[in-house]
């Protein structure tokens, strides 16, 4: 159950951040960098979640690692996609 909650939260964070940066290449690159650096918050969230008994044992720790790696992977994908896309989308007159 914990894994499902962590994955839903990670996908919600990614979807919300991408919806805020549509048609803006600079903001999307910054969002990708922030998502990649979110792995560093693992060091803060692990003791916090163990103290509050949200996660209990090694299984919860593994789920937390998957949560942070998923956000980091999406951050890398966003940066790679921004490199190969144009700054603004051109509307066609069809």
Image: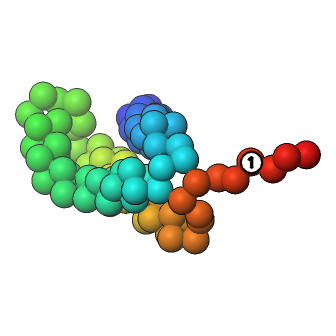
Left or right: where does residue 59 sit relative to residue 70? left
Q: In the current view of this chain or complex, which residue is farthest to the front?
A: 93
Left or right: where does residue 48 sit relative to residue 60? left
Q: In the current view of this chain or complex, which residue is farthest to the right?
A: 94
* x, y percent for residue 45: 17, 43
Task: Residue at 23%, 44% (x, y): give it.
Answer: 57
* x, y percent for residue 53: 17, 30
Position of 52 relative to 26 (above/below): above
Task: Residue at 51%, 70% (x, y): give it.
Answer: 83
Task: Residue at 33%, 55% (x, y): give it.
Answer: 30
* x, y percent for residue 68: 33, 52
The foreground one among 42 and 72 is 72
* x, y percent for residue 42: 20, 52
Neighbourhood count class around disc 1 (C-alpha, 10 Å): few under 14, some 14–19, many 20 upward: few
Q: What is the number of callouts on the image?
A: 1
Colour scheme of this structure image?
rainbow
Q: Does residue 70 show up?
A: no
Task: Residue at 69%, 53% (x, y): give it.
Answer: 90
- In what quadrant of the picture does the N terminus appear? top left
The answer to which image quadrant residue 36 occupies is: bottom left
Q: Does residue 10 show up?
A: yes
Classify mark 1: helix, strand or loop: loop
Identify residue for label 1: 91
């Amino acid at each position: 159950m914990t894994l499902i909650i962590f994955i839903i939260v990670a996908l919600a964070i990614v979807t919300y951040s991408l919806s805020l940066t549509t048609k803006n290449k600079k903001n999307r690159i910054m969002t990708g960098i922030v998502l990649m650096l979110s792995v560093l918050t693992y060091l803060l969230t692990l003791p916090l979640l163990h103290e509050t008994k949200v996660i209990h044992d090694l299984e919860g720790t593994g789920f937390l690692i998957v949560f942070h790696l998923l956000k980091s992977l999406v951050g890398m994908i966003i940066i790679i996609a921004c490199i190969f896309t144009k700054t603004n989308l051109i509307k066609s007159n069809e």
